[in-house]
Amino acid sequence: MSEETTNELSRLEEEGELAADYLEELLDIADLDGDIEIDVENGRASVEIISEDPSALDHLVGEDGEVVDALQELTRLAVQTETGERSRLMLDIAGFRADRKADLQDLTHEAIARLRATGEPQKLEPMNPFERKVCHDVVASEGLRSESEGVEPRRRVVILPAEDVDTDTDSVDEAEEA
């Protein structure tokens, strides 16, 4: 492993530790039981709050993951305050994001099957940047192209047949890479 890779890994592990400290304080304030797991995945720190009783963490997930999204942003800001650098940390609570990712992969595969059967572009439901990135990744792995259209919070993924691709259009916008 090169020194540069080692330094990057150490920086991401530090992000995870800072995030874990912040989240442990949050759990203490809210008087919630939960364990925190830290990892580095796909070039970013990954932190998950888990519990023996996952339903005990439901209010930290919120409806459609709205609370976990907000907590992720707050955690990123806390890490940025400590490091002085922007964080791309991913937060999962009680497996919500992991489950949502699997559901989105299935949904995207179904849309790809419809596209292949009909030849028609497939528009998916509006999604947040994390969800759109999951869909774009599935589309790319199937050798097809996708793009995002619309404006937040109604931004969605459109899956295109290979011949309908506009070569001047990026398949993943900058926000979705974050």
Image (cartoon, rainbow, N blue to C red):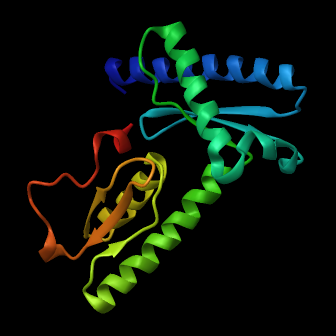
Q: Which residue lies furthest to the bottom in this view?
A: 117
At a point 19% along the width and 51% down the height, the residue shown is: 170
Residue 38 screen position, x and y as percent: 64, 31
State whether residue 56 is above or below residue 10. below
Q: In this view, does 171 lie to the left or right of 24?
A: left
- Near-viewer residue (165 or 142): 165
Residue 121 screen position, x and y as percent: 28, 77
State whether residue 163 is above or below residue 44. below
Residue 169 screen position, x and y as percent: 15, 54
Quarter holding the C terminus?
A: top left
State whether residue 44 is above or below residue 16. below
At a point 85% along the width and 26% down the height, the residue shown is: 30
At a point 42% along the width and 20% down the height, the residue shown is: 86
Residue 144 screen position, x and y as percent: 25, 70
Q: Which residue lies furthest to the left in this view?
A: 167
Report which quarter residue 158 is drawn in: bottom left
How many labels sit on residues? 0
Report which quarter residue 102 is drawn in: bottom right
Q: Is residue 94 left or right of residue 76?
A: right
Quarter holding the N terminus?
A: top left
State whether residue 128 is above or below residue 45. below
At a point 42% along the width and 68% down the height, the residue shown is: 124
Report which quarter residue 139 is drawn in: bottom left
